[in-house]
Image: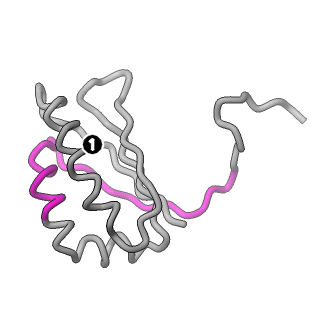
Amino acid sequence: MILEAAILSVRPGEQGAFERAMAEARPLIGASPGFRGMEVRPCLEDGRRYLLLVWWERLEDHTQVFRGSDRYAEWKKRLHHFYDPFPVVEHFAAPLVVQPDPMRPVTPD
């Protein structure tokens, strides 16, 4: 499993429109082969920033399959004009450490 991560900085005053556009665009990425799930989290310190997390089965499912599709062209049309600056997208391997319940604090051994 691959985790795609990006910090999305949205143009000032465009947060509501961005959130609506993201909700409408969600099925485009969700229909892509290899897609396993996604989260978009608003930043607490800066209301213009969001954390995008997307789980893919393989790196190529994002970089070739989705980005090479008509769905990505539509995703890009709906969302990319909101970003300033354009985000850096990175991909991460399986976790080195896993806390099974993120809501429960870690206790020392």
Vertical position of residue 99 compared to residue 56: above or below: above
SS of the residue under disc 1: strand
The structure residue drawn at horizontal position 38% and vertical position 74%, both measured from the top left corner, is: 33
User: Could you say which quadrant of the image residue 70 lies in?
Assistant: bottom left
Q: Which residue is mark 1?
A: 8
Classed neighbour count for the residue bearing mark 1: other residues with Cα under 10 Å, few (<14), some (14–19), many (≥20): many
Q: Amino acid at mark 1?
A: Leu
Q: Is residue 49 above or below residue 91?
A: above
Residue most extreme to the top: 45
Q: Is residue 86 magenta?
A: yes
- In the rendered image, the quadrant that contains the C terminus is top right
Name the spot of residue 67 as percent of width and height, x first. 25, 71
- Answer above or below: position of 75 versus 105: below
59 sits left or right of 107 in the view:
left
**Residue 78: x, y in percent?**
12, 52
The boundaries of the magenta stretch are 74-97
Q: Which is nearer the eye, 60 or 109?
A: 60
Indicate the quadrant containing the N terminus: top left, top right, bottom left or bottom right.
Answer: bottom right
Give the residue drawn at x 19%, y 38%: 20
**Which residue is painted at 20% across and 67% down in the image?**
71
